[in-house]
Image: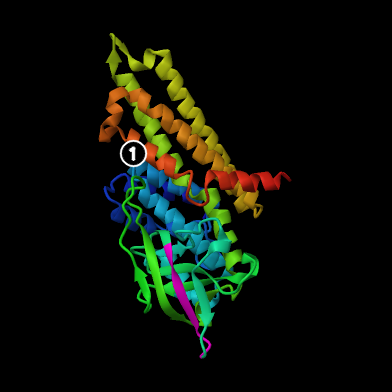
Amino acid sequence: MASQEFTYWLAGLRSRAAKCRDGDSLWHTAASQGLLSLAIPESAGGGGAGYEAACLALETLAQESGLSGTPFAMAAQAWACQEPLIEFGSKPQHEKYLTPLLAGAAKGAFAATEYDSGSDLLSLSTRAVRDSGGRWRLNGSKTFVTNGPTADVFLILARTAEGSPLTGLTAFLVPRGTPGLHIGMAMDKSGLTGADLGTLNIDDCALDDSDVLGGPGAGFAVLMHAMRYERAFILAPALGLMARALRQAVEHARSRSQFGHPLASYDTIRQRLVRMHVSLTSARELLHATARCADAGTLDHGRSSLTKLHVSTEFNRFCQELPDVYGGYALLPETGATALLTDAVASRYYSGTSDMQVKIIAEGLGL
C-alpha cells in the first residue's frame, strides 16, 4: 500500500471508528476495512502497508472510538495468532485459518498462560501425547485467553516432551467445536472493556499432525515469535487512548474556571498537562521506531521488551497525572480518568510483566 493510499485509508478508518459505540461494531468496521491484514505482506494475502502503519491504525482506532478493549483484542489476534501462522503455518493452514482471520470472518486466540504457569514454561501442565493410532491427545487448561469466549480457532501451547522448553513444547491449532474443547465464559475484570478474556478446559482433544503449527517440538519457537511482536506492539492502542485523554483534559483545563481564572492558567495544571504530553510523545516515538525496525526486519526480543516496558511505564505516569486535572470530577465516568488508570495498571502485566521485561533487557546487556 503506497503512502498516499494509506493516508486516505486511515482517514476512512478515523471517520468510521468515531461513529462506533460498541466493541462488536468497531471490530466489524475495522476488520472489514482491512486493519487485521494491514501489516501482512501482499504475497501472503495482506495489505502490505507494514508494521508502523498497522500500529498507527490501532492507535487511531482507539483514539477515535474511545474504546480500549476492542483495539487491544484485535492487536492480540494480529500479533500472537496471525504472526505465528504466517511464519510457521503450512499452505493448508493458511487457507483454513489465516485467510478468514485476516478478513475478519473469524477470530483467533493464543492460549499459553495457565493458572500456575505464566512466564514459567517449565511448569506448563497442558500435555499432548500420541495415542496408539498416532493421533495427539491434548489435555489441560488455560486462562487469561484474550478473545477466548468468542474465538473460532485457538493456538494452544502444550508440553509434548520432558526437559527443556526449547524442544519439549508444541503448538496446536484447535478449531472451536473440537470435541473435548470446553470454552469458559468471559471473565469479570476491571479494565479493557470490550476485550473478552476467558478460560479453556481441554479434555482429551484428538488432533492430527495437520493441526500442529511448525511441527512437533516447535512450540517454543512459535511462542517466542508471537511474543516478539506482541510485546512490541500490543500497546499501540494505548497511544490513542492517551492522545484522546490529553485532548479532553486540555479542553477541560481551558473551559473550567476556578477563582475567576481558567484552570489552564495555573502552573500546577499546565505542568501536569505538559508531563502527560511528554509521556505520550516519548512512548509514541519509541513504539513507532520499533515498528520501523520490524519493517526493516531487525526487530529483536530486547527491543520488543524495551518498548513494552517503556510504553507501559509512560502510560502509568500519564494516568497518575490525569485525575488531578479534573479533581473530584475524575470520579465521574464521563472523564474516563479512573477507567484509563485501570487499563494502564493492566498494561504492566500482559505479554509478560514489567519485571520480566527488565530481566530480558538486562540479559541483553550481559547482566
x 62%, y 46%: residue = 359
Q: Is residue 134 magenta?
A: yes
Characterize the magenta stretch by its predominant secondary structure: strand
Q: Is residue 245 magenta?
A: no
Give amino acid for label 1.
Ala
Element marked by disc 1: helix
How many numbered marks have been drawn onto this rendered protein structure?
A: 1
Using the image, determine if residue 283 lies above or below residue 170: above
- Which quadrant does the C terminus fall into? top right
Using the image, determine if residue 110 lies above or below residue 160: above
Query: Of 257 and 1, which appears nearest the observer?
Result: 257
Region in magenta: 133-142
What residue is pinned by disc 1?
Answer: 339
Residue furthest to the bottom = 133
| Coordinates of residue 286 in the picture (x, y in percent) | 57, 40
Compared across the picture, whether 116 is left or right of 304 comes to left
| Coordinates of residue 95 in the picture (x, y in percent) | 47, 75
Compared across the picture, whether 240 is left or right of 216 comes to left
